[in-house]
Amino acid sequence: MPSGSGFLARRLLHSLLVILGITFVAAAMIRLVPGDPVDIMAAGNPGMTEADKDNLRAQLGLTTPLPQAFVGYVANAVHGDLGMSLRQRAPVTGLILERLPQTAELSLWALVISIAIAIPLGTITALRRNGVVDYAGTTFAVLGISTPGFLLGILLILLFSVELRLLPSSGFRGSALMAIPFGPAAFWAKFRYFILPATSLAFALTAINARLTRSAMLEVLSQEFVLVARAKGLKPWTVVVRHALRNAIIPVITVAGLQFGGLLSGAIVTETVFAWPGVGRLAVQAIQWRDYPLVQGTVLVSATLFVALNFFVDVLYVAVDPRLRDA
Amino acid sequence: MSLEDLPPKRFLALADDYLRRYALSRRAALRGALATAATVSALGSTASRGDTPRKGGTLRVGRVEEPDSLDPHKTSLAVASATMGYIYESPARRDDDGKLVPALAEGWELRDGNKTLVFHLRQGATFHDGSPCDANACVFTVKRMLDPATAAPTAYLLGAFDTIEAIDDHTVAYKFKQPFVPVWVGLTSSYCGILPPGPVQKLGAQFGRNPVGSGPFKFVSWAPDSGIKLARFDQYKAGPVPLVDALQFAQYPEDSTRVAALQSGEINAIWSGQSVPLDRVRSLKRESDIQVQQRPSLSIRALDFNESRKPLDDIRVRRAICHAVDPQRVIALALDGNANPAHGPLPSAMPGYDKKVDQLAYKYDPDQARALLKDAGVQPGTTLHLICNDSPSIRQSAEIVQAQLKDVGLTVTIQSMPIGQVVALTKKAEHDIYLYTYTYFDPDILYPAFDSKGSLNRDFVADPDMDRMIEASRVEFDDAKRQALYDTIQQKLVEEARWAPLFEPLNFAAFDSSVQGAVLRVDGEIDARKVWLKA
């Protein structure tokens, strides 16, 4: 067996342990918070007696000790059954699956917008180093990183939907990706709903990615092969795009991949502001309601996606870097 | 004379009156509120003159919360109860004025010493799936609600229930162990709506996401993106068939987004719970194409003192705090004026409210407060720990209280957290002051809140005298005697400064100019059967 697959097998095992560990810690911690699901139901329901509450606890399976409950949970989870939500009385798997695509597509558009702006912006600021454009780019980056997501979201809504009435204020009306085969009008009808939330998500990412592109470009532009390319008499445009940018873009793509992993666990603030039916809001609601199976389910799915993306990056490294194959 | 010997007619009148009194007393309060709020459109209704109601259209409503389940026996969330009121039907309903009106039942009578309530159900009423909504469905529903395996969190609404029997297809007998005066409070609520045996058994745990009832609207869909969609049920028999084609409820958790959705025309209305943000009421009232309605709610916000530890076991310290806190300032600063000051343990809109507490209430007087504290030997700078829930208006109220108590030399530390955590932590008596919040439909809230055995008692006082009176009020069916007990209890609670009442919140609803015929009820909800949309 080649040692490269040994490396991957070890990483796979580590990944599984990490997922299991994260889920157990989440399950234990949510139970440490004062107030169980029945306490929360009873908070708005003064007529319930202690006996009523205990009966409900027994019916919901809250009387099982945590280690025992967790073992049963893992056994079922292996078979794809994440249990029933205590509060919504529906299978957790279904609740997550009906929200995950919305989060994934929003993350994707946010990433697309961010890359589409960040790479040209980063390149131009690198080429015009210490010029007006560079300072403007730096200002934009500081603004992007320091603007709270909810504030930007609300400002966008007030400007584009209440004042100008150009875009819908919130909500989701179906996948824009799926609408592509049905023509531009169908795509636009769905995509309009993505623009404001994806832009507000993309703002901070764009700032980071533009800075990253800029510094990578500066490094690459100072290397000798760029000088050689220029000396050959290639057009400045070709040198920058075909030679320099290709090399500079690698760290940006790596970071963007990790950003995507982070976005997939749900952009809680953006989903709340834009009434977006994603997993982030589901997770927050689960925590507020102490809906233990739902908390565990959202954590399990987010952790799995994040770890899987990291694992995928590792696989890519093995494919790209020969040194790792012998490790 | 015991209730069992009362002529049935008189008992029914008593039970009916009980229901109505608690709605009408709120109407009086409503008129008071309207008089002060000159900007409120047409008295309590969005109806404008010269327009005739028309059929059609979709009423789109934005709410801050979403139901957890639409199975009446699996939820106790107010937003779920409100939604279920459109889907399910009960033998009788309450109209906007709190009057009892026939719904699934054409009529009813009492038998067996007022312990049995017999309903005569309408012929031909069906569920949305076409199955008959008859006596068997009633029997099925009540048995399911009371089954310990169902663990319905609202089973207590049926009181001391004995059994239910179908006399024939259209006659059903609800049998109680003793005459139960508040019977209509439970039976008109959507938690006691009649369920279809077939779909409930077939769908099992999925019923709460795919409800079937016999109410004015039938369930269409419930998806995370489009919210809850309901369509008019044209075969509706229990009241006026709705005018709008469909009703849609979407959740907007963020206040600014919800208001923006109304302003940009994506939704027609905002109501239910805290859906109309208090800090936007003033600006919404100024907008010419937005209609705002308001009404006092059956809620109280108050400072509850933990008397199991020093220094609040001393009545002088509690009275000092009552004198030091000015509810008017809390309302003005934390709620932008959108509440009424509270004077006692019950909201003024609740039946059983004793007007005398208005006079007994402690006047804002910081000098008096300082003198009382000095007298009690409380050092300036003494620290008190206040626990409250994390809703913005509550948190801000706590901060105003903090500032006012600082003025008389008390330092307050605030800990705010989600309501479930608050309930659990305060149960362990880890606080000095608890910013108590409740919403309840009946003065029986006194039992959970103030009886030493009450599940929501957070002052930890064991006063046998108080317990005796509260417990007597629960079984006293004589109107005057029960009121006398309530009066004594409220006066004693105020005199002993068991808590410092702050304010009674208001309910709000906001509509765009197309919405007609909407009337905000005391529970903060709208009867959508009467609403219509201008073309």
Image: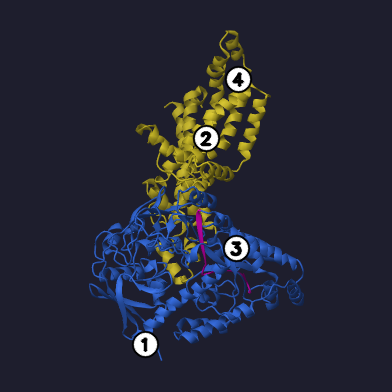
Chain colours: A yellow, B blue
Q: How many marks?
A: 4
Q: Amino acid at mark 2?
A: Leu
Where is mark 2, residue-wise? A258
Q: For the residues tagged 4 and 1, is the chain the same?
A: no
**Quick one: B503 or B206, which is closer to the camera?**
B503
Residue at 55 percent across and 55 percent down: it is: B284
Contact? badges 4 and 2 (CB < 8 Å): no
Mark 1 crowd level (few <14, some 14–19, many ≥20, 10 Å Cα)? some
Which residue type carries mark 1? Glu
Same chain, marks 1 and 2? no
Marks 1, 3: nearer the viewer: 1
Q: Which of the labelled discs sits on residue B524, or is there none?
A: none
Whether the magenta-drawn stretch holds residue B525 is answered as no
Q: Is residue B134 left or right of residue B336?
A: left
Give the distance between the C-alpha atoms of the residues marked 4 and 2, in whole angstroms. Answer: 23 Å
Q: Which residue appears farthest toward the bottom when viewing the image?
A: B1
What label sits on residue A220 in the rendered view? Answer: 4
Q: Is residue B81 visible?
A: yes
Task: Classify mark 3: helix, strand or loop.
Answer: strand
The answer for which chain carries disc 4 is A
Q: Chain of mark 2?
A: A
Compute the Cα span from label 3 to label 2. Answer: 39 Å
Q: What kind of residue is marked 4?
A: Val
Q: Which residue is mark 1?
A: B4
Examine the rendered structure and indicate whether residue A10 appears above or below residue B91: above
Residue B461 appears at what percent x and percent y? 59, 77
